[in-house]
Amino acid sequence: MPIFGTRNASQKYCKPIQKLKKIAVFASGSGSNFQAIIDAATQGNLPAQLCGLVASRESIGALQRAAQHNIPSAIISRKHFTNESDFAQALLMQLELWGADIIVLAGYLTKIPPQVIAKYRGRILNIHPSLLPKYGGQGFFGRHVHEAVIANQESISGCTVHIVDEEFDRGPILAQAEVPVYPDDTPELLAARILKEEHRIYPKTITEFLT
Ligand code: GRF
């Protein structure tokens, strides 16, 4: 009779019980990447539990997505705090309440305070809509990225999943996907082409990171 859940290597049928890692997602916008992660989890393709959503402001699409899928959410906005340290403490308290193991940034536009990076070092992931290190750093967000790519007549762009450290868009790269840039592209067309790749590689990279 096999005893499930033990680590006795001599028992062929035994499989160690592993606690599912808990992911907290941070978002500032529509949350289409958040949705791709929810979908992966729902389809059993993400070995993790989505324990909560931190929204940087009210009325964002990501909050509706969380509600639709019974994922707890909290609106923790930098502007509600007089200093960064208090903001960091609020984030850390919420993460602790949820028991979050890793943080996944999905279109999150607020700078992560150093106290949070220190506590979750190597466990914060981000997706950026360019082939980093190109078109990353301060000021390169949203359509600004795609405008610069088109203005420079690049023939290839794409997206990057990376670990977050103290510098904007500079942490170790985990995965990238390329898309072509066409001569008659607009920032909107290019953004949509890249977003499709983001939805494909982000859940897959999170899964690889966790396993
Ligand atoms: C994506 O393009 C992502 O690369 C960037 O912010 C955007 C978020 O889009 N960091 P969404 O809210 O996931 O739709």
Image: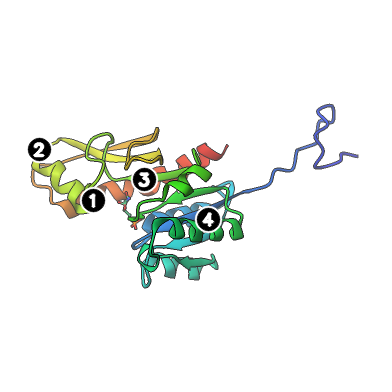
Disc number placed over residue 153 in the picture, else none? 2
- Name the mark on residue 127: 3
Task: Quote the CA–CA distance across marks 4 and 3.
Answer: 21 Å
Residue 26 falls in image quadrant = bottom left
Asked whether mark 1 and ligand 1 are closer than 8 Å, the reply comes as yes
**Disc 1 or 4, which lies upstream in sequence?**
4
Q: Which residue is mark 4?
A: 92
Q: Secondary structure at mark 2?
A: loop
Q: Amino acid at mark 3?
A: Ile
- The residue drawn where x is 80% and y is 34% is 7
The answer to whether the residue labelled 3 contacts the one labelled 1, judged by CB atoms less than 8 Å apart, is no
Amino acid under disc 4:
Leu
On whether ligand 1 comes within 8 Å of the CB at mark 2, the answer is: no
For image coordinates 46% across by 61% down, the residue present is 54
Q: Give the mark nearest the N terminus, 2 or 4.
A: 4
Asked if the beta carbon under badge 3 is closer than 8 A to the nearest atom of ligand 1, the reply is yes
- Left or right: residue 42 compared with residue 170: right
Residue assigned mark 1: 191
Front residue of 80/126: it is 80
Quadrant in which the C terminus is drawn: top right
Residue 181: image location, x then y, percent? 17, 40
Going by the numbered disc 1, the residue's amino acid type is Ala
